[in-house]
């Protein structure tokens, strides 16, 4: 490594027998969650409904850095779209 530090020693991980089955379970869970959101995503108030749900989740979980990172692109695009050139 460029910094001169080395990664900690660890036992080898069997990607096929350990990681792949876990990823398969995550995949199944994500697809099931996506299927459950079909009705919400079809409503006209979906943006508000989803924002409220995310707000409730964030307020219930103290460690929400990942959620804030996911929100950042939308906040940025909203700010950029609201910027208008000033009249000279």
Image (cartoon, rainbow, N blue to C red):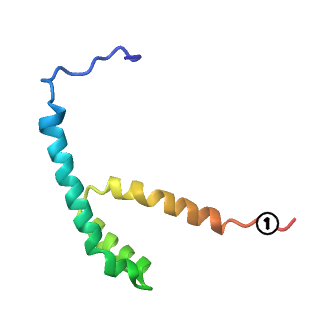
Q: Quadrant of residue 39?
A: bottom left
Against 23, residue 29 (above or below) is below
Tell me: residue 64, above or below residue 7: below
Question: Who's the residue at 64% across and 66% down the image?
Answer: 81
Q: Nearer the viewer, residue 39 or 53?
A: 39
Placement of 14 over or under 47, stated as above or below: above
Few, some or many residues within 10 Å of mark 1 (<14, 14–19, 20+):
few
The local secondary structure at tag 1 comes to loop
**Left or right of 19 in this view: 86:** right
x%, y% of residue 42?
Answer: 39, 81
- The residue positioned 18% from the left and 33% from the top of the image is 15
Residue 61 falls in which quadrant of the image? Answer: bottom left
Q: How many marks?
A: 1
Q: Nearer the viewer, residue 53 or 17?
A: 17
Residue shown at the point (47%, 57%) measured from the top left: 72
Image coordinates of residue 17 in percent, x first then y, are 12, 36
Residue most extreme to the front: 16
User: Residue 3 location, x and y as percent?
Assistant: 39, 17
Residue 54 percent coordinates (x, y): 33, 70
Q: Badge 1 is on which residue? A: 86
| Residue that sits furthest to the right in the current view | 88
**Depth check: 47 or 32 in front?**
32
Q: Is residue 25 left or right of residue 68?
A: left
Q: Quadrant of the N terminus?
A: top left
Quadrant placement of the C terminus: bottom right
Instruction: Name the residue at 79% across, 66% down.
Output: 86
């Amino acid at each position: 490594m460029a910094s001169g530090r080395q990664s900690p020693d660890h036992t080898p991980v069997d990607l096929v027998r350990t990681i792949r089955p876990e990823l398969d379970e995550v995949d199944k869970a994500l697809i099931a969650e996506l299927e459950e959101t079909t009705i919400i995503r079809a409503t006209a108030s979906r943006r508000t409904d989803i924002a409220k749900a995310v707000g409730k989740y964030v307020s219930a979980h103290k460690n929400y850095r990942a959620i804030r990172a996911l929100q950042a692109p939308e906040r940025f695009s909203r700010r950029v779209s609201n910027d208008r050139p000033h009249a000279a």
